[in-house]
Image (spheres, rainbow, N blue to C red):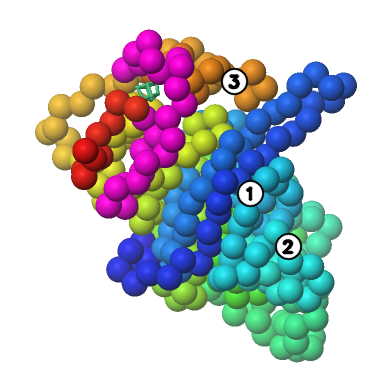
């Protein structure tokens, strides 16, 4: 997307984020996030990818204040997002919005499309009825729908159109940061690219910054400036999207990448099939959390949990990987 060329300032800074969920009946603790740190630059799309249960949606929900972390900090445009209360929190709720995976579940079926998109303006006390209606019609058109759709109900629309309604509802407050939580996962492949192109266009038109969460590396790669790869509550690699095929270094990223169609189909590629399931986040293995499935694991990997090391904008958490500039 556009941000790589223009963005320098950090809009969002996440530091050491931990989220534990106690299980019912005191049967243990789900370690959903285990010290996640990342920055998102103003104007970029940061793609976050990983298998179901890796913690990526929990991270998104903390950023929009739907969850409270166990430890760590989140700074948005220089403001402590987690400490904000009252008027400052209301302002943050305008500035940080979320697009949900399931457009049907996230839209109240009893409300008209116009009322659904207008509701955030009413909640935040913005504009009179005439101004709000004009804004709703403008955003219907921005997302590829028509003002005549104002009085219709969500069930009258296709899945892709419902996601367009969800996008209009998220953007009508003119947020700076949008957390897109698997926004195309529930859609047909042909519709996915339409929604991705729409998000791209809206980013250019409205100057948006995206945290784009998905389980498919090919979807994330298509839309992102930088990519973060998560495994069992940790970030294991961060790199520029344009260097994904040439520089991905973590064995887990390489396994995900082996399933993505390459831009150069002549280049031979070996599909890496990971054995076993992702371990339970309740009962984490010692050492590197990936060592039970890692095709490159050595005996020492069961002993040491490698930290995320960064050189030249490339971060990797693997004790076997040498980064440029490493001694
Ligand atoms: Fe694989 Fe070992 Fe690297 Fe973990 S530290 S990713 S187990 S090689």
Name which residue lies at 75% across and 83% down: 126
Residue receiving disc 2: 83
Q: Is 57 drawn above or below residue 83 in the view shown?
A: above
The single residue placed furthest to the left in the displayed view is: 266
Quadrant in the picture for residue 135 = bottom right
Graded by Cα atoms within 10 Å as few (under 14), some (14 to 19) or many (20 or more), the crowding at tag 2 reads few
**Mark 3 vs mark 1: in front:** 1
The single residue placed furthest to the right in the displayed view is: 25
Residue receiving disc 1: 72
Q: Is residue 102 visible?
A: no
Residue 3's x, y, as percent? Answer: 37, 66
Quadrant assignment for ligand 1 = top left
Instruction: Decide which of tag 3 and tag 1 comes sooner along the chain.
Output: 1
Q: Is residue 314 magenta?
A: yes
Chain part drawn in magenta:
295-318
User: In the picture provided, is 310 more to the left or to the right than 182?
Assistant: left
Name which residue lies at 44% across and 54% down: 46
Graded by Cα atoms within 10 Å as few (under 14), some (14 to 19) or many (20 or more), the crowding at tag 3 reads some
Q: Is residue 270 magenta?
A: no
Q: CA distance from mark 3 to mark 1?
A: 20 Å
């Amino acid at each position: 997307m556009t941000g790589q060329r223009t963005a320098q300032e950090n809009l969002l800074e996440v530091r050491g984020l931990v989220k534990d969920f106690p299980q019912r009946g005191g049967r243990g603790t789900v370690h959903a996030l285990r010290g996640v740190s990342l920055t998102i630059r103003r104007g970029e799309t940061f793609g976050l990818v990983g298998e179901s249960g890796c913690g990526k949606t929990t991270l998104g929900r903390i950023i929009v204040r739907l969850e409270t972390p166990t430890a760590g900090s989140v700074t948005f445009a220089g403001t402590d997002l987690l400490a904000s209360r009252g008027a400052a929190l209301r302002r943050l709720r305008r500035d940080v919005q979320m697009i949900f995976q399931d457009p049907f579940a996230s839209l109240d079926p009893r409300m008209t499309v116009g009322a659904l998109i207008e509701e955030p303006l009413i909640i935040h006390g913005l504009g009179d009825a005439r101004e709000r209606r004009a804004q709703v019609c403008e955003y219907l058109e921005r997302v590829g729908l028509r003002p005549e759709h104002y009085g219709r109900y969500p069930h009258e629309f296709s899945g892709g159109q419902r996601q367009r309604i969800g996008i209009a509802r998220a953007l009508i407050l003119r947020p700076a940061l949008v957390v897109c939580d698997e926004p195309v996962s529930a859609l047909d492949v042909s519709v996915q690219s339409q929604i991705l192109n729409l998000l791209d266009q809206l980013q250019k038109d409205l100057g948006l910054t995206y945290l784009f969460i998905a389980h498919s590396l090919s979807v994330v790669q298509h839309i992102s400036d930088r990519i973060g790869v998560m495994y069992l509550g940790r970030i294991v690699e961060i790199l520029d999207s344009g260097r994904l095929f040439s520089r991905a270094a973590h064995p887990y990223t390489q396994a995900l990448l082996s399933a993505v169609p390459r831009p150069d189909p002549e280049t031979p590629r070996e599909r890496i099939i990971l054995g076993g399931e992702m371990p339970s986040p309740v009962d984490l293995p010692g050492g590197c959390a990936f060592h039970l499935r890692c095709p490159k694991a050595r005996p020492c990997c069961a002993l040491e949990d490698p930290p995320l090391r960064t050189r030249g904008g490339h971060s990797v958490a693997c004790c076997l990987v040498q980064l440029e500039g490493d001694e």
